[in-house]
Image (cartoon, helix red, strand yellow):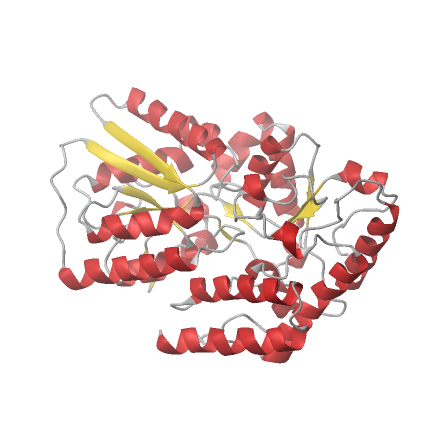
Amino acid sequence: MSAYSVSRRGLLGAGAGIAAASLLGLKPAAAQQKDIRVFWWGSQERADRTNRAVDAYKKANAGIEAKTEFAGWSDYWPRLATRVAGRNAPDLLQMDYRYMFEYARRGAIVPLDQYMGNALKIEDFGKANLESCSVDGKLFGINLGVNSSCAVFDPAAWEAAGVAPLAFGNSWDEFVSKCAAFAKGNKRKKFYATMDASGHEPGFELWLVQNGKALYGEDGKLAFDEKDAGNWFKLWAELRKSGGCVPPDVQALDKSTLDTSTLTLGYAATAFPHSNQFVGLQQLNKAKLDITAFPVTAGGKPGQYLKPSQMWSIASDSKNPEIAVKLANFTVAEAGGAKILGVERGVPASSGMRELLGPDLDEVSKKVVDYIGKLGPYTAKLPPSPPKGAGEVAFVLERVSQEVAFGVSPEEGGKKFVTEAASILKRG
C-alpha cells in the first residue's frame, strides 16, 4: 500500500462497488479479441514507465492492443469499484495488500495458479513473496516490487541546521531530540525537521509493534488500546511543542500525494513514505535526498516489515486473461519490461531481475535497493491482512490526529480514535 491513507469516500465507494458486483453476479461487456485495458494508481513518473513497458510489449507482440489509464491513490479505488460494479473492469489492474483479500473473496479477481510455469514464470520470487500475494492458499497477485516504510530526508538541510539526520538504529527519543535541535539551529522560515506523522497509519503500526502491540489482531479487531493511541499522539505533541515538526496548518496541505508532501512543498526536511516512492520524491525535489529506516523503540521489537508494494491482478470478467497475465509477466520477469519499470514500484521480487537490474541502476534506484538490503535487522513478520473497514480507520486516525494537533488533548484523542475505530470494525 501507499504511505498515504485512502479517503473515506473512496473506501466506502470501493466496498459498496465490490459488494454490488458480487451480489448481482454481473457479466463483462464485450471485448475485442486481443484488446486489454490496464489500470493502476501512482505518479506521472510511474505512468511514464508503465506506458513505455506496455508499448514495448505491444511492439514484441503484434496484434495486441493495450489501453492504459492511471489515477491517484484516493481516486483509484472508487473508480475501480464503479467499473467492477458496472461490468467494465480493466483486464489488468493494480492491487494493494489492503484490498486483495476483499476483492479475491468476492470474486472480483481470479486465482492465477493455473498460469504458473506457462504464461506466468515467477517461481524465483520465492515462497515469502508468493505467499504475500495469496489468499486462502491461492495466488491472486503478481508482486510488482518489495518495499517497506522508510524515512526520506534532505541531508543538506539537516547539515545546515547543524544536526545529524535520522539514521538506522536511532531511537524515537533520539529522533525527538534531533528534531528539537534542528528547530534551534535552522535559519529558514517556516521550515521544520519533519512532517507531522501522527496521522500516518504505517508509522503508528510499526511503533505499536515495536512496543509489543499491533494494529489489528488475527481476529480482525484492534490490538491496541486508547492509552497506546494517546501515547502516540503525545510523542508528536512533544515534537510540535519544540518546533521540530510542521504545525497543523502546514500538515493539512498534504493531500496524500508525493507532490503535496511537506517535503516536496519545502516545509519539512523529512517525510515518511514507502521506499518505492523514493524515486518519485527525488524527481519532484531539487535537493538531493537520502533514505533510512524509521526510529526504533529502545529495548523494543523490530517494527517494520517487507511487503508487496503493489500487485498486478486479473479481473474476473476479463475476456483475455491470458494476454493480461503475459503482459504482467513481461513487466516483472522479463528483461524488456523489468528494465523499464526499474525499482519505482519497489525492488523486484525476482532474484533474476534484481541481478539483471543491478549494474544499470541509477544512483537514486541504487539507494532504494541498498535500503531494502540493510533493513533486515529492523523487520518483523508481515502482519495479517487488514480487516474490512481498515481503510476507514486509517482516515479516522488522520482526522483525529489533526484534531489533537489543533488543541484536543492526546489522551482525549486516543480515546476518541479507539472508540470510532472499534465501531467501524464492529459494523464490518
* Front residue of this view, candidates 179 and 343: 179
* Front residue of this view, candidates 38 and 115: 38
The residue under the point 14% across, 47% down is 28
Q: Where does residue 51 sit, x and y in percent of width and height?
A: 38, 28
* Front residue of this view, candidates 312 and 268: 268
Residue 385 visible, this orientation: no
- Quarter of the rendering occupied by the C terminus: bottom left
The residue under the point 84% across, 44% down is 186
User: Please, is residue 371 above or below residue 336 in the view?
Assistant: below
Quarter of the image for residue 211 reads bottom right
How many numbered discs?
0
* Front residue of this view, candidates 267 and 137: 267
Q: Is residue 210 left or right of residue 339?
A: right
Residue 214 visible, this orientation: yes
The residue under the point 39% across, 40% down is 71
Q: Where does residue 77 sit, x and y in percent of width and height?
A: 36, 51
Q: Where does residue 150 sit, x and y in percent of width and height?
A: 63, 50
Q: Where does residue 368 sit, x and y in percent of width and height?
A: 61, 40
Q: Is residue 29 left or right of residue 51?
A: left
